[in-house]
Image (cartoon, rainbow, N blue to C red):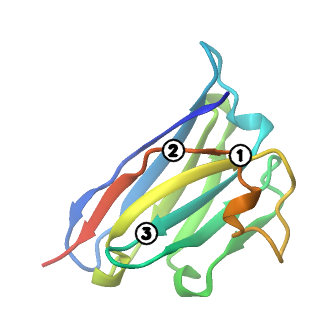
Amino acid sequence: QVQLVESGGGLVQPGSSLRLSCTGFRFDRFELDAYAVGWFRQAPGKGREGIASVSKSAGRRYYADFVKGRFTISRESAESTVHLQMNNLKPDDTAVYYCAARSSMPGAGDWDDEAKYDFWGQGTQVTVSS
């Protein structure tokens, strides 16, 4: 069992930036390097939607159209952490953000398929408001 922990959420003004982090733990060892990782979000009253996904080697990255050019997903292998850099945040970005890990390789057709992800974090709140 892999435990995922998100951090970095908060309350910011429109146009600001935030960097979310997702760290994986299994017992006392870092395990996230063995998995592809995706970020999802759920806004109030809406369903959960995929934002971005990165493969184990970071060779493949996928983004939802509504975040392209603003959000960047990256891996920091030394700390077994995946980041989501979010720039130029908008009020519509307000949501609970979740990271999730999968053992299978994400592809263009399924990177945002929630059913493909094996482990989920508890989420971190991001609020964009003036």
SS at badge 1? loop
Q: Residues within 10 Å of mark 3 (few under 14, many from 20)?
A: some
Is residue 58 placed above or below 40 in the rendered structure? above
Judging by the rendered image, the residue that carries numbered circle 2 is 121
Residue 31: which quarter of the image?
top right
CB under 8 Å between callouts 2 and 3?
no
Q: Disc 2 to disc 1, how far (Cα)?
A: 11 Å
Horizontally, is 98 left or right of 109 in the view? Answer: left
> Going 69% across and 70% down the picture, which residue do you hit?
112
Q: Amino acid at mark 1?
A: Asp
Q: Is residue 44 above or below residue 8?
A: below
Give the vertical position of 52 relative to 89 (above or below): above
Q: Is residue 54 visible?
A: no
Residue drawn at (65%, 17%), measured in percent from left and top? 29
Q: Residue at x 47, y 67 (%)?
A: 41
**Disc 3 marks which amino acid?**
Gln
Q: Which residue is mark 3?
A: 42
Depth order, front residue of 10/113: 113
Disc 2 marks a residue whose amino acid type is Gly
